[in-house]
Amino acid sequence: MSVTPELVEQDDGGRLIKKIVALEAILAAPFEMVTDEQGREFIPPPAIVAERDKSERERLAICTDWSNHSTAWLMRHRLGLRAVLVDLMSGVEIKGDEAMIQALAEFSKRNASHIKGILNLTIPLSESPMWILGQYLSQLGLSTESRRPLEDGQRVRYYRLNTSNVEFIQKVLDYRQRQREERERKRQESLELQAAYAARMQSQYGIEQRGTCAEKQRGKNLYNNSPLHPCTPAPLPSSSPSTPPNDESGDNNRGGMDTEAELSDSWWERVKYYARLAIECVENGVDAVKELLSTLTSDERCGVMLEFEDLDPDKFAQLVTDAPQWTEWMG
């Protein structure tokens, strides 16, 4: 979105996105009830919530004060807030005397101390159900507006979510969903690339791809029909050193070299071949280049990068910019 003074004010120093993330979590459909070994039943949080907790713990490994998104989600779920929000987000109006609103308020008052500890909300026992609901909505970046029509000679107040507020938040939620779908698509393409490459290595040379791909493919059928990625290399013969046969004098040192002279030319041709593949892989991101290099020996990797720079200095500069740590791949 275009940055405007109104948008900056609405962002509130980054607090708004945190509220939208919490709303996104409670709107996500939970998993079905499960039973643990002790016979206790509980509802696991949606994958989007569990993954957020997991990634935070992996990213902040030494932290001892994580956000515990799953715990906050569980409290809101037990409040019955999801059912209320689904109706409100679809444009339903409420008066505050509905059974689910009354149940939410009663649960809040009975568990006020837990709600304070988990959601950091103080629930006074004297407040109305609509006031209590408003506090939960505020934590999710939502607000209400009301109207008072005349019914049977009396004014009745109806509440609904602020329309412009909902439209704005819905755009953000839709954008986040598209981003997740795009990341998942790229992840699947990467898995297909790795599987196809591992299958070719297995079928042609009877060896598994080194690194994480080998771990993922071990024990699985490597002969699959996944489409080959344009960056997938057709492996050349192994570059491991070989011991040449003895010459007429019985010596096999070949003047200090452990291979015949023509094998050096073969090694250099192999390096040039992989350098051209690496140039093509740049279009698919630095991970593709790193994956290609991981299949080579250390001296081949160095040779490939040298040849890469000579063949296409511009793309080499792009690679260095995107992956300044590329020298670590050489080890």
Image (spheres, rainbow, N blue to C red):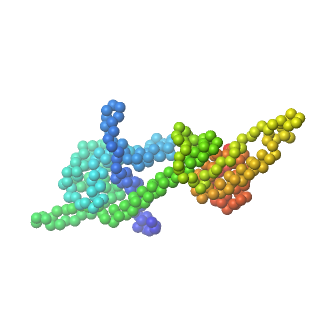
Figure check: 32 above or below 20: above
Classify residue 8 as left or right of residue 131.
right
Q: Which residue extends farthest top?
A: 38
Q: Nearer the viewer, residue 3 or 27?
A: 27
Image spot of residue 265 (x, y percent): 78, 49
Figure check: 22 above or below 253: below
Classify residue 105 as left or right of residue 52.
left
Image spot of residue 321 (x, y percent): 63, 57
Classify residue 70 as left or right of residue 308.
left
Image point 47% across, 56% down: which residue?
182
Image point 22% across, 48% down: which residue?
103
Image point 60% across, 52% down: which residue?
232
Image point 64% across, 42% down: which residue?
205
Q: Quadrant of the N terminus?
A: bottom left
Quarter of the view holding residue 32: top left
Image spot of residue 116 (x, y percent): 32, 46
Q: Quadrant of the C terminus?
A: top right
- Residue 329 appears in the picture as rendered: no
Q: Which residue extends farthest right?
A: 249
- Residue 236 appears in the picture as rendered: yes
Q: Nearer the viewer, residue 113 or 188?
A: 188
Tally of numbered discs: 0
Image spot of residue 36 (x, y percent): 35, 34
Q: Nearer the viewer, residue 178 or 269?
A: 269
Figure check: 174 above or below 247: below
